[in-house]
Amino acid sequence: MWPEVGALAAWGAVLVVAVMVTAWVAHLRRQNAGIVDVAWSANLAFLAILYAALGSGFHERRVLVALMGGIAGLRLAVHIHRRAHGQPEDGRYQTLRRQWGGNLAVKFLFFFLFQGLIDLVLATPFLLAAVNPAPRIAPLEWAGVVLWMLAIAGETSADRVLERFKENPANRGKTCREGLWRFSRHPNYFFEWLAWIAYAVFAFASPFGWIALVCPALMLCFLLRVTGIPATEAQALKSRGDDYREYQRTTSAFVPWKPKQ
């Protein structure tokens, strides 16, 4: 098992480096590092498909790996691209430019490659499941599939509602409180995290599948403490002020819950 895992991971690393270097070159032309978010999401889809294509595990299981990882990763990549297309560089990356000072090209190259490394770690559930030779889909794996479907439906719904809200000029400077956004300030993040729980549940039925539990834990850390909620809310407070502060007071930060009065 482990020699195959190592070989697949090596091919995955080659793929990720190629994608991230290509994205880095594109960012140099555009002077917009936001493309890293598109590449990051697309890499997860590419890795799931690569592992499923090259893995020696049970065929039907590999098909599920390719479908789950491929659909989720490409959906998110397309959504991010549509949202950012034609817009100025995200404030997070503008801040990095100011903080990093000189040698920005080299520093952003390492940043892009580090994002690729995170992709490789997060793709662990796909890798472990793709080499699982068990000749049937276990009930735990079907539970993972069902949970994944719920997560993708929730995340897609949240993204669409927010997109429609932002398209209305009358909502400029206002905070979306429609649909799932009434119950969580970040329902898209919550359901993204739920998808990673689903991947871990799916992989848990494979040999050494418990290793995949690190993925939802890592994703939760990123969302709650690093690049997710803190950066998003800081930007929202700058652009929406008191309206967003009231939203913070009444609405759950992450897990959908009944709003406060």
Image: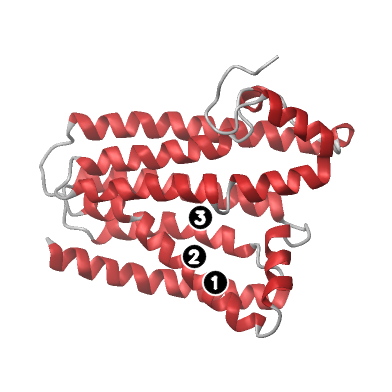
Q: Position of residue 159 (x, y in %)?
A: 62, 37
Q: Which residue in the protein does label 1 denote? A: 111
Confirm whether residue 68 shows in the render: yes
- Mark 3 secondary-structure assignment: helix
Confirm whether residue 31 shows in the render: no
Q: Amino acid at mark 2?
A: Gln
Q: Quadrant of residue 250?
A: top right
Quadrant of the drawing holding the C terminus: top right
Q: Which residue in the protein does label 2 denote? A: 115
Q: Which residue in the protein does label 3 denote? A: 41
Earlier sequence position, callout 3 versus callout 2: 3
Quadrant of the drawing holding the N terminus: bottom left
- Please tell me which residue lies in front, 90 or 85: 90
Confirm or deny contact between disc 2 and disc 1 (CB under 8 A).
yes
Instruction: For label 3, count other residues whose C-alpha is less than 10 Å away and answer few (under 14), some (14-19) or many (20+).
Output: many
How far is mark 3 from mark 2, CA to CA?
10 Å
Q: Amino acid at mark 3?
A: Ser
- Mark 1 secondary-structure assignment: helix
- Please tell me which residue lies in front, 206 or 193: 193
The structure residue drawn at horizontal position 55% and vertical position 33%, both measured from the top left corner, is: 254
